[in-house]
Amino acid sequence: MLQVDEVSGGYGKEPVVRGVSFHVEKGEVLGILGPNGSGKSTLLKIISGILPKQGGKVTIDGKSASAYTQKQFARKVAVLPQLHAHAFSHTVKDTVGLGRYPHQTGLFSSWSDQDERAVQEAMNYTGITRYEDTPIELLSGGEQQRVFVAQALAQEAPILLLDEPTNHLDIAHQQQLLDTIRNQAHQKGITVVSVFHDINLAALYCDRLLLMKNGEVAAIGTPQEVVLEQEIRSVYEARVKTQPHPEMPKPQMTLLPDLKEETEQFRIMKEDVKIREDHVVLQAQQPLKTISSAVHNAGMGWYRTFINRGVRHDYHCDDVQSELADYLLSYDYQLTDTVAMMTAVSPEYVNVQEFKAEFGSIVIAVTVGIGNAVDVSKAWQREELPYIGTINTWIFINGLLSEEAFVQAMITATEAKTKALQDEEVIDPESKTIATGTSTDSLLIASTQQGASLPYAGPITQLGKLIGRGVYECTVHAIHSYRQAKDEAE
């Protein structure tokens, strides 16, 4: 559909864009990225004919772009510039109607049914039909952008060129605008080439990305192939971290600022774990990087307060998360700053130990309720019924963990817990085999992210050995406490 071969050009004798080549297929969205001054907008202006080429060739539908007349080119290519000047006051419908100019013929062109259909369809598709009689200057910036997108769509050109269409828009208008453009590309087969300032938006909405540096192509490919830490650092000269989007198979980027602020050194100690009447709590001096399967704030994040709440054996609630949130608020714990678990074990039976090694230390806290012990290999034979119990494990690490170490720490801790259940001969009452855990176990790994670097936490590493020993010993002690309490109750 659109072919760019070795294109060079700019504003003076020295070209801003040098030897750029790429192609875009029908229905494809290509995003152009790069730092300020890299030639993104200049390239788009050369393709659209606003700036002359100093070299190379632009081909549209197999025909050189220079071979088209101005109106012929406008029937092939619609352009949405970065800024719009309002020389005159027009209604929304009149503004969208300007997109039909390339299809007008003769000195006194009449408005055809096809023109009306194209305008109404474009307004409806962009959600601006209710504004059709409103002067455009009375609309918000986001609404105006949708009007100009509708104008470009009403042009019914098979190629759409956009120059930073989301500039100065809030996130809601960014989403609305890009949803509209992408849907139009995929549903109507429009070829879209857009300059982006925001790497994350480009990665989300584009099929492929072209990354520019100093007027040349630094990389081109799918978002997964272009939004790479090393590539982005090299082009933008900025520290970044990439991670997957939570709902789509697209990469997202986080900026890592070079902050020079002095942070107070601290570490977690056994004495930091406090036993209250109905919960165990640890409140750190600073937020800890945390991964957990907790009830409240599960997943990855940074938190200062950690709660293991004990509930009655007959506890039942239709909305556990809301009830737990109310409970936390009753103690003035901040919901956004707190990770919370629940257990049917009284807080007094928590087993807390500190373990030290050359790199530093870890603190482990375990509560064990094995009334619903489960052999995971036999769980498929069980009915889905609620059972009382839970093994909750906290591991606080004084060190700097990699993401891989967090995952390995969870694996190592789970293996150590299972070994403790095996040695203590904890039985699954349904299958009559050795249990591997319970159906509602929770695990938390939290790190100060200070001190020694700990890239791994497998069983042959110092950290892994400490976790394995610590979780095993604490789980065994907690099992003994559970059994003793049960015997006393009987």
Image: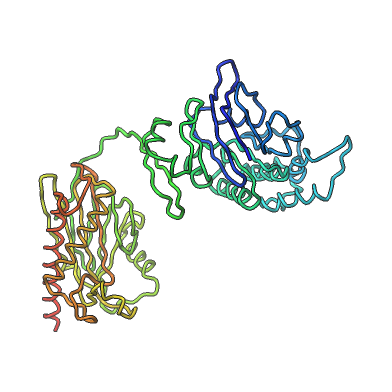
Residue 31 locus on image (x, y percent): 54, 39
| Picture quadrant where residue 140 is located | top right
Residue 464 locus on image (x, y percent): 17, 53
47 left or right of 485 in image: right
| Colour treatment of the image | rainbow
In this rendering, the answer to whether 490 lies above or below 9 is: below
Q: Which residue lies furthest to the top in this view?
A: 13
Q: Which residue is located at x 29 percent, y 34 percent?
A: 261
Of the pair 483 and 112, the residue shown nearer to us: 112
Of the pair 251 and 225, the residue shown nearer to us: 225
Of the pair 55 and 138, the residue shown nearer to us: 55
In this rendering, the answer to whether 421 lies above or below 211 is: below
Residue 444 locus on image (x, y percent): 25, 58
Q: Which residue is located at x 65 percent, y 23 percent?
A: 52
Residue 368 locus on image (x, y percent): 19, 70
Q: Split into 4 quadrants, where in the image is the N terminus?
A: top right
385 left or right of 367 in image: right
223 left or right of 465 in image: right
- The mark total stands at 0
